[in-house]
Image (tube, rainbow, N blue to C red):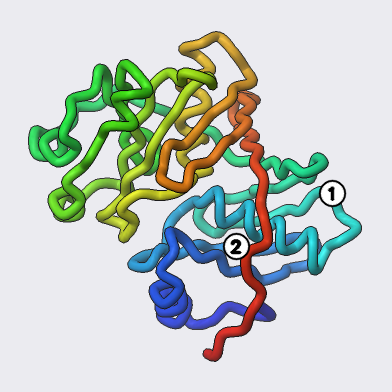
Amino acid sequence: MDEWLDESKMQAIAAENNLSETAFLVKEEEQYLIRWFTPVCEVDLCGHATLASGFVLFNFYEKQKKRIDFFSPRTGKLSIEKQGEILFLDFPADNLKPSDISKEKLNALGRTPILCYHGREDYLMLFETQKDIEELSPDFSMLAKLETKRGYIVTAPGDECDFVSRFFAPYAGIKEDPVTGSAHTTLTPFWSERLGKKELSAQQLSKRGGYLKCINEGDRIKIGGKAQLYLVGEIYI
């Protein structure tokens, strides 16, 4: 956009799109200002909508560039870099602290984790096996009533990759996210320390699914994935 729309209008567009997040961009000199809205609220950070934004910019507006810089009013400097077919997000790393979780939240999740932590926006819950993650069937109506920072990351060692995860955020209007780049700013330092590796392969076990390459660079995390053009169209405001 040339300038920001009214916040209520951006929220209404995101609600009408009814996707996990809708990204809005305004170009400012050599960078793009970026904001993200779920169907019910604005969020501090979103990976796959930033990946999609980078894909659109690289393919339609900034065809000669290999790197695009973003600035989020809530999160600060971000960037995306094109390396062949893979787009790498450069995001700030999250810091985890051990956390207790209420009996109500555990009942809503339907299974008790081995360990629980909280980060910048989400809970992270460690389970023993990939099968545990695949079989989780939360009570979303109950979770939606329980206030949290944003959502719940559930994770375990992967059978064919370093780790797997799923992400639930019904309180923020998202029952289950297909692929959650921002959650991997939490997952990557956690698994990097646990496995003693800087580069990790990850799979998100949503119905649609997604594969990611994650690199721990200390206070920054690089998250790589592919994007594909799905739709070109117009909306009336």
Q: Mark 2 points at which residue?
A: 34
Determine whether, in the image, residue 215 is placed left or right of residue 193: right
Closest to the observer, 147 or 57:
57
Quarter of the image where one finds residue 28: bottom right
**Mark 1 Cα-neighbour bin, 10 Å: few <14, some 14–19, many ≥20:** few
Q: Determine which of the numbered discs, if any, sits on residue 13 in the image.
A: none
Q: Where is residue 120 in the image (x, y as percent from the top left)?
A: 40, 39
| Badge 1 amino acid | Lys
Q: Please identify the residue farthest to the right as the structure is shown.
A: 64
Quarter of the image where one finds residue 15: bottom left
Determine whether, in the image, residue 166 is placed left or right of residue 192: left
Closest to the observer, 182 or 96:
182
Q: Which residue is drawn at 43% across and 57% down?
A: 43
Q: Position of residue 147 (x, y in %)?
A: 19, 50
Q: Which of marks 2 and 1 is nearer the N terminus?
A: 2
Question: Which one is in front in this view, the residue at disc 2 or the one at disc 1?
Answer: 1
Classify mark 2: helix, strand or loop: strand
Q: Determine which of the numbered discs, if any, sits on residue 66 in the image.
A: 1
Q: Position of residue 104 (x, y in %)?
A: 9, 39
Kindly report the distance in space between the C-alpha atoms of the residues bearing marks 2 and 1: 18 Å
- For residue 106, above or below residue 161: below
Q: Which residue is drawn at 18% across and 29% down?
A: 111
- For residue 159, above or below residue 44: above
Q: Where is residue 193 in the image (x, y as percent from the top left)?
A: 50, 14
| Badge 2 amino acid | Ile
Q: Which residue is drawn at 27% across and 25% down?
A: 116
Classify mark 1: helix, strand or loop: loop
**Mark 2 Cα-neighbour bin, 10 Å: few <14, some 14–19, many ≥20:** many
